[in-house]
Amino acid sequence: MLVLNTFENDSRVYRTAKTLSDNGHQVLLVCRYKEGLPRKEEVGGFEVERVELPRITRKELKEIAKKRAELLIKQALSEGQKNPSKRFISICKVGLYKFSYYTWKAINGVLYLPIYLTLSLINLFFRCCGLAERCIGAFIRKSETAMLSVIKARWLIGYLAGSQNPIISFLRGIQPLKSLFWYLRRRSMHFLAMSLRKLKALYWPVRRVILLSIRKVKNCYWFLRRQLLRLRNAIRRVWIVRLRWFSQRLKGTFLSFLFPDYSFEKRKFSYEAFGDLALERAREFVPDIVHAHDFNTLIAAGKIYQEMAVPYIYDSHELWVHRNRPTIVAGDEEREWEARVEKELMIDAAASITVCDSIADFLAKEYGVKRPIVVRNTPDVPPSYLSAEGKTTHLRHRLGLAEDDFVMVYVGRIAANRGVEDILGAMKLLPPQVKFVALGAMAPHFEGVFRRYSLKLNKRTKRVFLHPPVPSDEVSEVLLGCDLSLVTMNQACLSYLFALPNKLFESIHAGLPIVGPDSPEIKRILERYNCGLVYKDRNSADLAKKIETIFKSSSLISELREGSRRAAQDLTWEKEKRVLLDLYSELLEDPSLAGDFARGTV
């Protein structure tokens, strides 16, 4: 089994591999290696082996540049290319747009560091000023008290009354001097005692000032230490992580600007490299059937088929040629190449599988091949979840939401053209009791949009919450405490128009009312089982109207919940896996397809 991702949270691949393993097949899943993940492990009864793809070298890059130059020369010399400057202008526009965008992102990250450091220094300056003011004020107050307590010298000069007796006159004459002596002695002792008392009284405030100064110095030290640690972390975050990310993006932008087909060639290189690695592993494992998940592993399955004559199954999770590409500028050449390769390899495939009827009809009509078999992404949920009634302490209590809050949840990758902008726009028109929880991984290119909307909606009370993704087999359990599920998907491409996402079935198994777009597959499920309402695509006002209708009607909530429970009894993996197992049994029993190795290895 082949899948060109890291196999961390791919529910369809996991369910398919586990189903085959539980039914006696030996399954080896070859996927992509990522740092921090084990290269080999056993999950759900089957083996997982991760392979590391090689990077494109300078020599290969030169070959790409050479091919690109030859192609431009041919286009310029061909008769059909009347004005080759138009293509150059379009190339410049794309390159300049990418360059300006990533430059702005880098400037934003670089300016964060000096602003943060300046604010920290200002804060430290004012703290030091406050410490000095307190110390100087205490010293001045104690000095004034000591100065006011200094002895007021009063010099008493007695009346030197004379007498006829010279001795008495002398004694009377020296009496004021004697009195002055004792007076000075008393006053000097009093002054000494008062000085000692004042010094003793001054000791404690001075001691307090010294201890306070020491404490302030220690606090300043730890404050400076914390600031330096924050500065170090900021330097790591800004100058290492962001700068590294910016350099990689700038490199890709520069190469895309010079060679617009660089990204396309790089993707082809990764497909070919994964195919070589998968072929090496297949030579050791010797499978009976190769199960290729999505187009990016189809080339690897074709290589194994050409060399070892092993039949392969093409499992199309979406319309790959017409998929959503918000961060990829795909040219007509790349789309034509993908369509040509997909058609050729689908013709050679022993069987094809897809996720819904609309995609199966489109592939059969577009490529003129046999209609693929439909195996929907219904979850494998234990019966205990299906019988759960009422609200439970799951997502609501994880986020600390009140019992009277009306909790809406969106499950899946938070990215462009997923309908998240429609939800955030509808939140402005809904009452404050309505809360929105986005449960999934945030795409880097969409983080700024989500944060901008969230800051506006969370000014008074917090209404928008972000929860990290949870394992696929726990999603239905986590959703049990919510009131409404928003299964949004903008019709930005044919793949999204015909989409039948996992989150729809996970919400149904959680017994939630659902609001979804007017795309054919989602609309068919909601109307057939009466488990939700449909809104107009990219219309936030209509979405808010449908949400408010459910919010204000408890009877409608009960009716839609009952519809979800009925749908959950019908839309189960137990029914879908029978189609998959029947297909494998048919292929393994056919000697023209399975060859001589009828062991049931995948």
Image (cartoon, rainbow, N blue to C red):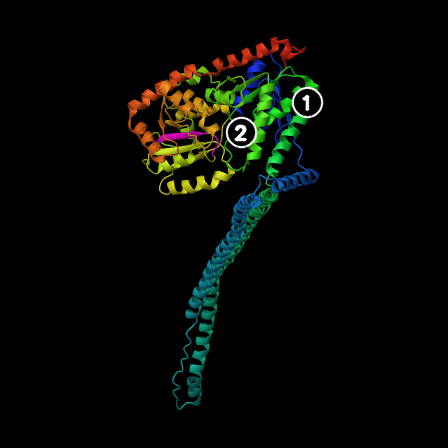
Where is residue 142? Give x, y as percent.
44, 64
Q: Nearer the viewer, residue 28 or 159?
A: 28
Where is residue 353? Give x, y as percent.
53, 19
Residue furthest toward the front? 79
Residue that appears at 44% across and 87% down: 170
Q: Is residue 341 magenta?
A: no
Q: Which residues are magenta?
A: 405-414
Helix, strand or loop at mark 1? helix
Question: Which residue is disc 1 drawn over?
Answer: 281
Image quadrant containing the C terminus:
top right
Dot 2 and dot 1 residues touching (CB under 8 Å): no
For residue 12, above or below residue 492: above
Residue type indicated by callout 1:
Arg
- Can you tell which of label 2 and label 1 is closer to the viewer? 2
Q: Nearer the viewer, residue 385 or 574?
A: 574
Circle 1 packing at 10 Å, graded few (<14), some (14-19), many (20+), is some
Residue 399 in sight in this render? no
Circle 2 packing at 10 Å, graded few (<14), some (14-19), many (20+), is some
Residue 277 placement: quadrant: top right
Of pointers 2 and 1, the one earlier in the residue sequence: 1
Helix, strand or loop at mark 2? loop
Q: Nearer the viewer, residue 158 or 422?
A: 422
Residue that appears at 47% across and 74% down: 185
Residue that appears at 45% across and 41% down: 449
Where is residue 96? Give x, y as percent.
54, 47
Residue type indicated by callout 2:
Val
In the picture, measured across the screen, residue 12 lies left or right of residue 422, that is right
Question: Which residue is disc 2 drawn over?
Answer: 321
Where is residue 526? Give x, y as percent.
38, 22
Q: Mainly helix, strand or loop, the magenta region?
A: strand
